[in-house]
Image: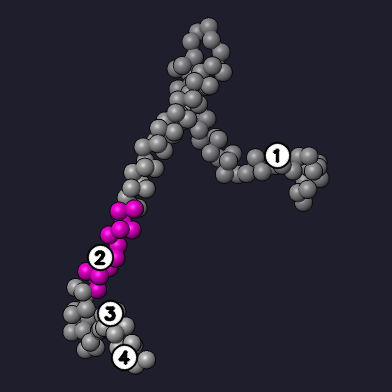
Amino acid sequence: MVVGWPWASRSWSCCISLADPHAVLLGGILAYILNPLVGWLRAPRRHRTIGAVVAIALIAGLVVLFVLIVVPLFTKEIRLLIERLPGVLEQVGTRSRPGCASASGIELSSTRERARLLRRRV
């Protein structure tokens, strides 16, 4: 039960989340945007409901098409990034090490050199 809404019983508590302000705002924006399309799709002898259903189906189809195109490209790029990241980080470390040493006066050793030195100590 939600505090502050005395009329809300347990049976209504599952539906109260539908009154989320973000959902209401998104619904209002979609209704405002789709209103001209629904009016255009409505024929003189047809109901507005048919135009609304067609408009929602068109928008849902566009969203599905967008997801089907973008998700495979995004996963491909993430895999490529994961494959190339170690080499890129090594290049950044190699190129920035001389500049850091000259600016700070401290010689930076690579990770491999540090690992080799640690093995000698053990």
Residue drawn at 58 percent across, 41 percent down = 23
Q: Which residues are magenta?
A: 79-93
- Which residue carries the number 2 mark? 87
In this rendered view, identify the residue nearer to me: 31 or 63. 63
In this rendered view, identify the residue nearer to me: 50 or 108. 108
| Mark 2 vs mark 4, CA separation in Å | 27 Å
| Mark 1 vs mark 2, CA separation in Å | 52 Å
- Which residue carries the number 3 mark? 112
Sooner in the amino-acid sequence: mark 2 or mark 4:
2
Disc 1, SS = loop
Image spot of residue 91 (x, y percent):
22, 69
- Of the residues shown, which amino acid type is indicated by label 2? Gly
In this rendered view, identify the residue nearer to me: 46 or 103. 103
In front: label 3 or label 4: 4
- Which residue carries the number 4 mark? 120
Mark 3 crowd level (few <14, some 14–19, many ≥20, 10 Å Cα): few
| Mark 2 vs mark 3, CA separation in Å | 14 Å
Image spot of residue 57 (x, y percent):
49, 25
Q: Which mark is residue 15?
A: 1
Question: Is the Cβ of the residue at disc 2 closer than 8 Å to that at disc 3?
Answer: no
Sooner in the amino-acid sequence: mark 1 or mark 4:
1
Sooner in the amino-acid sequence: mark 1 or mark 2:
1
- Of the residues shown, which amino acid type is indicated by label 4? Arg
Mark 1 crowd level (few <14, some 14–19, many ≥20, 10 Å Cα): few
- Of the residues shown, which amino acid type is indicated by label 1? Cys
Left or right placement of residue 41 versus residue 24 in this view: left
